[in-house]
């Protein structure tokens, strides 16, 4: 059973817990999937970045500056 399969019990402030076992697990993280241009635009709109007129300018700038390919 992996750690993500287990549910945490309800804990309260100042509660003392007994350690019953310790295990070192090695793993790897993976980067998130690439965003499509429409996903970038949706996220910009959601976070209030730019206007309808300026969003294409922002995207063009990040492409020209080689921040994305």
Image (cartoon, rainbow, N blue to C red):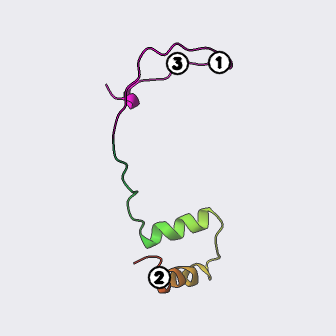
Around disc 1, counting alpha carbons within 10 Å, would you say few (fewer than 14), some (14 to 19), or many (20 or more)? few
Residue that badge 3 annotates: 9
Q: Nearer the viewer, residue 29 or 20?
A: 20
User: Residue 4: x percent and y percent?
Assistant: 40, 31
Does the CB distance between marks 1 and 2 fall below 8 Å? Answer: no
User: How far is mark 1 from mark 2, CA to CA?
Assistant: 49 Å
Specify the quadrant of the image occupied by residue 10.
top right
| Percent position of residue 16, x then y | 61, 14
Instruction: Give whichever of discs 1 and 2 has the lower sequence position.
Output: 1
Q: Are marks 3 and 2 in contact (CB under 8 Å)?
A: no
Q: Which residue is mark 2?
A: 63
Q: Residue at x 54, y 84 (%)?
A: 61
Label 2: element kind: helix
Residue 18 coordinates in the image, percent (x, y): 52, 13
- Hey, which quadrant is residue 66 in on the image? bottom left
Query: Which of these two is toward me, 52 or 34?
Result: 34
């Amino acid at each position: 059973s992996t750690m993500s399969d287990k549910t945490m019990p309800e804990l309260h402030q100042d509660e003392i817990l007994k350690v019953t076992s310790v295990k070192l697990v090695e793993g790897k993280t993976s980067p998130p999937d690439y965003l499509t241009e429409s996903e970038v635009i949706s996220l910009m709109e959601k976070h209030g970045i730019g206007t309808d007129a300026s969003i294409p300018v922002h995207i063009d700038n990040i492409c020209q500056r080689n921040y994305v390919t």
